[in-house]
Image: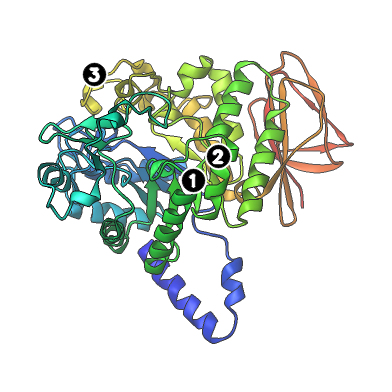
Amino acid sequence: MRKRYISAVLIFILLILSGCQGKVEEQVSDYDGRTFYEIFVRAFKDSDGDGIGDLRGVTDSLDYLEDLGVQGLWLMPINSSPSYHGYDVTDYYSINSQYGTLEDLKELIVEADKRDIMIVMDMVINHTSSEHPWFKEASSSPDSKYRDYYIFTEDEKKSREASPMGAGAPWVKNSIREEYYYALFWGGMPDLNFDNEGLREELKKIAKFYLELGIDGFRLDAAKWIYNNTEDNLQWWREYNSYVKEINPKAVLIGEVWDNISGMEPYAEVLDSFFVFSMGEDIIKGLTWKNLNGIGDKLSASHKRLKEKNPDFVPAPFLSNHDQNRVMNQLMNIDKYKAAAVIYLTMPGTPYIYYGEELGMSGKKPDERIREPFLWSENLKENTQWIDITNDSSIALENQRDKEDSLFNLYKTIINLRKNNPVLRLGDIEALEQDHKEVYAVERTYEESKAYIFVSLAEGESEVNIEKGSYNILYSNINEQESLDTEGKLKLKAREILIIKKAD
């Protein structure tokens, strides 16, 4: 991505000099429409035989990801940390030694760039680890220069305050001094004090370090909890985003703003993208109850709201992530699973796949069980060994590659269809009017192109309205034809998944 960034800057300068700056603003973002893949490095691929996934393992897997159609990676926390998950950082400028080194990260960036794969990394700056040198010094000495990097109080009444998240107590007793510190998520993760200007500048320097290393952007952990109010959060992320864009105008900030669409909407003005939790929830719920007719309207309405807030905003749909039970545990049915994949991978924005989702890996809370080793092989010793594997090893990648109807091959097909058809990446979305509760039907439009996505859970045929004309069949799980003609009606077979594009 570094080469493309440098080229973009040169083009930008030339266009300004020639008075054509408006043309730059019309260009489609490099991020918009790609398919991203979320990786828990510890669980993904082991390159050195120690049983722990590492950055070199991710580099070794780039050909697999490219073949799958992936054009972006989100690396879960890779900085130094005392925990298996990494969301309590002890050194922002170093890599977890179990994952490798900064040189390994640089190599990954270079090799990903050769394949046109963007890389964003988790930026965990809502809090640090209680083992971070800043906090150690701040908690032991009131005169420390880091004291105001955190939030302390001697008011014992604070310890009885309720958490703004709705459960637990956010104030934790300092084991060294007679006082309390604020830690919204856990005592081992003390919150940072964003009212401190020195801290804010320090956090910007960390962003600069990785952007200059070649990272394409950041997934912002706990983006809505920097402050306990939206207005102050927006002010900070606007400041941070402005700083990041000064270093790399094409860098992207993707926020974790876990809320309903109304709660998320304001962040569309200050971030480039965020994960639209409600979209995945609506898809899962609709498939669970076999009520698909309203999903298209909901997805279309959410997309329009976000675009009205900011025309350049890019929604990030997904089905599940590292904090949620896996899709298989929510749907418990492979046909519904395939339907869910087709629906969200043909939506506008930049969809995210949680590693192993394309295999149908299972897992439900506690968190370790939704972060089990990726199943490369049925021979469990050929996968990472960071935790024992409870998944059915028969779903391993090696067993799905050559099965035409496998979940893996469905993901590969749909992702590459999206990659090769701008209308499926960048088009607007509208629900089609139809009377079948068990049918999902939407239209995607981009410039002069139109595509239609149909998903039926019905046990019999369903008839839907569609514009008269000739269509190319991009995908069907039943129909082997390459094209079809309609007179304004289209009959879907039982449990059919169909993606068609209007012929030129």
Q: Residue at x 62, y 52 (%)?
A: 309
How crowded pointer 2 is (Cα within 10 Å; few <14, some 14-19, many 20+) is rated as few
The secondary structure type at the circle numbered 3 is: loop
Q: Are marks 3 and 1 in contact (CB under 8 Å)?
A: no
- The residue under label 3 is 388
Percent coordinates x, y for residue 68 in the rendering: 45, 40
Q: Are marks 2 and 1 in contact (CB under 8 Å)?
A: yes
Is residue 186 visible in this depiction of the protein? no
Which of the two labelled residues, at mark 3 and mark 2, occupies the earlier sequence position? 2
Nearer-the-camera pick, 62 or 77: 77
Rendered position, 277 above or below 372:
below
Q: From the viewer's perspective, is 394 left or right of 373? A: right
Nearer-the-camera pick, 341 or 24: 24
Q: From the viewer's perspective, is 148 left or right of 267? A: left
In the orientation shown, which residue stands out farthest toward the right? 487
Residue type at the position of mark 2: Gly
Which of the two labelled residues, at mark 2 and mark 1, occupies the earlier sequence position? 1
Q: From the viewer's perspective, is 443 left or right of 102? A: right
Nearer-the-camera pick, 407 or 10: 10
- The residue under label 2 is 263
Residue type at the position of mark 3: Asp
How crowded pointer 1 is (Cα within 10 Å; few <14, some 14-19, many 20+) is rated as some
In the orientation shown, which residue stands out farthest toward the bottom? 17
Look at discs 2 and 1 and give the one toward the viewer: 1
- The residue under label 1 is 230
Residue type at the position of mark 1: Thr
Q: Residue at x 76, y 14 (%)?
A: 460
